[in-house]
Image: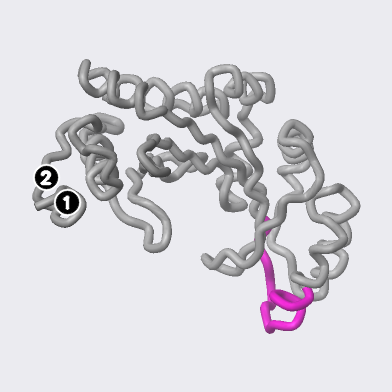
């Protein structure tokens, strides 16, 4: 019997004993999330269909703390995912309080930062855009303009997307997707969601050594706290 055939029978007490099996690695990630205490209470861990397992942060800036694995051949790594300002209300909280220099400094602590600009209708995300701005330009723009965020009515859609093209939030070639996915539909309003992603990755060697020393959970909590501090928020983890 191989661990890949019956992976659900194998332990996942540490990353090293998962033997590179993604099912077990992700089970270990879930177990770590469930070990977190947020504001003195056991973390509520759930699964977002089509995405990942996450712990509810009980914060408005970053609402979900996700941890998962990726496997490439014999190698694997563990990823922390924090999506900040992912709704209009969340964005106002996030950009009003974040420190641009502290956010930029996350690069120096090993985080990968990227924009997550999209538009939504009610609770459904419709389209994502990369645009042409650097990450620093992106957060500077929204730090300056976040208080102008509001729900846009249908008669404003064309001007809205033109303003985004002018500011570099979207590209001219995005207009055909906008036409197909939004303008040709019957949406009566849109929400603008200027989010961004803070992602931290542990290599196989790093995650294994930390977990063998019973230090991975503490390192995870430290990385989460650093990210929240950069956006002007605090999270109590124990």
Q: Going by the picture, which residue comes out furthest to the right? A: 166
Q: Can you tell which quarter of the image residue 185 is in? A: bottom right
Which residue occupies 40% across, 40% down?
65
Describe the colour scheme in one phrase. one colour
Residue 204: image location, x then y, percent? 36, 29
Which residue occupies 22% across, 45% down?
24
Which residue occupies 66% across, 58% down?
128
Residue 117: image location, x then y, percent? 67, 51
Relative to the observer, which residue lies in front, 101 or 122?
A: 101
Which residue occupies 26% across, 50% down?
23
Q: Are marks 2 and 1 in contact (CB under 8 Å)?
A: yes
Quadrant of the rendering where the C terminus is positioned: top left
Against 97, residue 169 (above or below) is: below
User: What crowding class fits label 2: few (fewer than 14 Cα within 10 Å), some (14-19), or many (20 or more)?
Assistant: some
Range drawn in magenta: 179-192
- Helix, strand or loop status at disc 1: helix
> Residue under circle 2?
10
The reply to whether the magenta stretch includes residue 24 is: no
| Left or right: 48 in relation to 172 | left
- Helix, strand or loop status at disc 2: loop
Spatial separation of the CA atoms under disc 2 and disc 1: 5 Å
The reply to whether the magenta stretch includes residue 184 is: yes
Residue 9: image location, x then y, percent? 9, 50
> Residue under circle 1?
7
Relative to the observer, which residue lies in front, 178 or 204?
A: 204
| Left or right: 70 in relation to 29 | right
């Amino acid at each position: 019997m191989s661990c890949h055939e019956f992976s659900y029978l194998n332990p996942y007490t540490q990353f090293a004993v998962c033997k590179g099996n993604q099912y077990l690695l992700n089970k270990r990630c879930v177990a770590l999330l469930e070990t977190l205490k947020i504001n003195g209470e056991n973390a509520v861990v759930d699964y977002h269909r089509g995405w990942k397992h996450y712990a509810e942060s009980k914060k408005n800036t970053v609402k979900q703390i996700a941890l998962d694995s990726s496997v490439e051949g014999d190698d694997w790594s563990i990823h922390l995912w924090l999506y900040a300002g992912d709704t209009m209300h969340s964005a106002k909280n996030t950009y009003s309080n974040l420190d641009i220099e502290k956010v930029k400094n996350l690069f120096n602590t090993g985080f990968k930062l990227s924009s997550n600009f999209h538009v939504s209708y009610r609770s459904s995300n419709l389209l994502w855009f990369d645009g042409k701005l650097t990450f620093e330009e992106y957060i500077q723009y929204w730090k300056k303009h976040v208080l102008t965020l509001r729900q846009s009515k249908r008669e404003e859609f064309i001007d809205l997307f033109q303003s985004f093209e002018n500011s570099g939030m979207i590209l001219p070639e995005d207009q055909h997707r906008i036409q197909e996915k939004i303008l040709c539909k019957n949406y009566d309003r849109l929400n603008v969601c200027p989010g961004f992603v803070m992602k931290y990755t542990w290599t196989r060697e790093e995650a294994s050594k930390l977990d063998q020393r019973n230090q991975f959970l503490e390192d995870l909590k430290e990385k989460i706290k650093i990210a929240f501090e950069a956006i002007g928020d605090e999270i109590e983890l124990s």
